[in-house]
Amino acid sequence: MRLSLPLLLVALLSGSTAFGFARFRCQQAIQPDPARGSIAGTVTIGGKPAPHITVVLIRDNHDVPVVDRTVTDEAGHFKFATTSSGRYVIKAIAPTSTPTETANPDSEGKPVSLKDGEELQGIDLPLVRGGVITGRVTDSDGLPITGEEISLCQIADDGSKRQCYQYDRPEFTTDDRGLYRIYGLTPGRYTASAGKARAEMGGIDHQGRGNYVRTFYPSTTDESQASAIEVTSGGESTGIDS
């Protein structure tokens, strides 16, 4: 059976389109994935290699909190292999130590940017032994204040106040004796306080905390009268009472 010219053209065009679509699908299927790279570095504490320290890799957009983790070897080295390109933050998890460049124990770490197939090296995470502040919080009758949050403010070299940090995790609140112990602090000068400003005070919260006026060390409600607390690497400042 012979096809008329119009039908023949339609058949040829249909076959060509189907072939082109199949070739496009084939090209899609065999297209290689972007080359993955790696990120390597060293964790040190006080200038010495830090073995057995957990290091986490975090997406910079924080959609996925942690995308990978590893542990340093005996020489303090770590490596994230077969990592896709993108922007990341790398953080060493060492609760009793602190990064040298920040006063915030909850710092997000060191930002890095990785290209396809790139092998980043020398991403070092220097830490120092953190300092410790301990003290006791009591009311006007000398009775312990239980479950009270402690706030620290670091003092800059020029005497101005840097960002303040409030430690509301269980280990950074007062216990049944009114005692607290905050560790892993970056060396420097701090003010310490417990309680709330009068404008923040209201009822008792679900943990039983409430009407304790913010009091600074040593037992003053006037922040300008607060004494500076010297925190040293590996040292402990005791008797910081409010």
Image (spheres, helix red, strand yellow):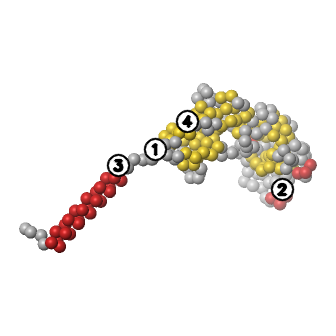
Whether 75 is drawn above or below 106: the answer is: above
Label 2 SS: loop
Q: Mark 2 or mark 1, which is nearer to you?
A: 1
Checking the image for residue 30, the label placed there is: 3
On residue 197, the disc is: 2
Whichever of labels 4 and 3 marks the residue nearer the N terminus, that label is 3
Which of the two discs, 1 and 4, sits closer to the camera?
Answer: 1
Q: Which is in the foreground here, disc 2 or disc 3?
A: 3
Quarter of the image with the C terminus in it:
top right
Q: Residue at x 28, y 57 (%)?
A: 22
Tag in front: 4 or 3: 3
Residue for point 85% across, 53% down:
213
Residue at point 56% right, 39% down?
120
Local secondary structure at mark 4: strand
* Residue beneath disc 4: 79
Cα–Cα span, label 1 and label 3: 14 Å
Circles 2 and 3: CB atoms closer than 8 Å: no
**Residue that label 1 marks:** 35
Give percent across and percent down for residue 228.
87, 43
Q: Nearer the viewer, residue 187 or 134?
A: 187
Label 1 near label 2: C-beta < 8 Å?
no
| Label 4 to label 3: alpha-carbon separation | 30 Å
Which numbered disc flags the more N-terminal residue, 1 or 3? 3
Where 77 sits versus 141, above or below? Answer: above
